[in-house]
Amino acid sequence: MIKQGILMIKTTTFLKLLLLFCILSCSREPIPTPSNQPQGIQLPELKVNQVQPKATKAEVFVQLLEPGNLTVRSYGCLIHTSTDPDLSNNSNNLIRSGAMNTETQFSFSGLTDNTTYFVRGYIVTSVDTVYSSSYEFKTQPHWRLLSSPYPDGTVSNTATFTINNQIYVGGGFLNKTGFWQFNPVTETWTGEAAIIEPMRGLNGLVGFPINDIGYFGTGTYLSGGTFIHTKSFWSFSKPNGWQQMPDFPGEARAAAVGFGLMGMGFIGLGDIQTGKTRDFWGYNPSTNSWFSIPDFPGGDRTEALAFVIGDKAYVGFGVDQNNTGIPDLYEFDPAKLDNPWTKITGGATPPARRSGFVFVIGNSAYIGGGSGNPGDLWKFTPNASEKWVKFGNLPMGTLSFSTGVSLGDRGMVVGGRPQTNGGNLTSQCWIFNPE
């Protein structure tokens, strides 16, 4: 009897529970399925349209495809060497506030040359952060080989000047007679009138501009197995072509330095028949005459470097009477011709070199190459707290007897003897982009 009572109680309880389940199942409304996006919400859409890279900079253009209908808290652009930069992986972030324009330009700097990067645009809304697809690009190398070699073949010790934004290069070893114009926009060479006698075949000559006229002078040529130094001095302009000017008044020489500054020209240092010299001379085109100035205080010197930044010139490096390299630099002020020289001091100084190259970009000069150094490149900025900064090494290894050419925002190196060519002469031209 007791067992039957227990069984009836269990059966009754089970039936009650079953009846309650059926009632609840019939009367309960369906549970709604969660949605990822509330109805009526439209997220913005964007994409990276294009990237314009340089060596250490990049201009990124991000296009807004669909503005959406949410409140925009901020927007921006991310760049990183990883595939998908986002706000959580320490990407370089340029952030903006307010509404995004149809297309927005972002300028990145401090990048590494010849490196692959990824960029993404993004918008932070009141609901979520929206990213564009990742855009891959590669920064340019600082150095690149010009597709057009020097048209006069393998060469060294040429001279150059720039007039009316056109670069002219001529002369050079051995007995080169071509005179060529280089267009820095198209990066192409065109021929000009051949260098006339007695300048034909000169190498180790100097070139510089004064206003819209270029000047070539001094140098050496091979005659009967002997190198003969010269005092020749010529001007070139369009449409007048070559005009002979008064001879250089110092001793005939080669491997001197020359520069144009404040409406005058200056030539000094170099190899003379009895050795090396330290004298300096100025040329005034308004009187078509030469005048002497105080000697270079760094001593007898040849195969040195000279360049102009602003209203000052700078002369240094090269070798002395004992062919010992001198790692120094002097400032030349044409406003103080009675005492124009001041030695640059302080900070790190590049190693000594002879027959190196130099070109000027903006307010800085870039000095590199030359015999007796490992093929380095240094940046000199006269008004900076740290005047000398090592910029890296040359892609062609050691390089001597080449010619540096300033191209405005770039530099170029013409010919010379690069290590990558076994130290033999080359017709290669290299373009340098600091940014």
Image (cartoon, rainbow, N blue to C red):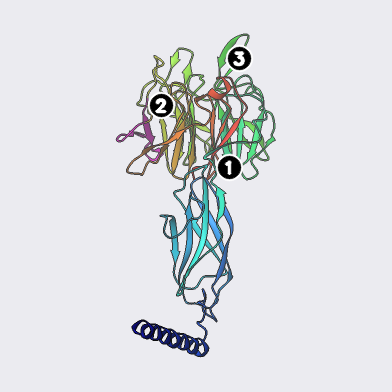
Q: Secondary structure at mark 3?
A: strand
Residue flagged by tag 1: what amino acid is it?
Answer: Asp
> Which of disc 3 and disc 2 is earlier in sequence?
3
| Location of residue 139 in the rendering, given as x and y in whole percent from the top left corner | 53, 46
Image disc number at residue 222? 3
> Which of disc 1 and disc 2 is earlier in sequence?
1
> Which residues, given as a range, are shown in magenta?
327-349
The Cα atoms of the two marked residues, 1 and 3, are separated by: 31 Å
Q: Secondary structure at mark 1?
A: loop
| Location of residue 6 in the rendering, given as x and y in whole percent from the top left corner | 36, 83
- Does 252 sit above or below residue 361? above
Image disc number at residue 212? 1
Horizontal side of residue 330 vs 18, given as left or right = left
Q: Is residue 405 magenta?
A: no
Residue flagged by tag 2: what amino acid is it?
Answer: Phe
Image disc number at residue 317? 2
Image quadrant containing the N terminus: bottom left
Q: Is residue 336 magenta?
A: yes
Inspect this view and state whether residue 418 appears.
no
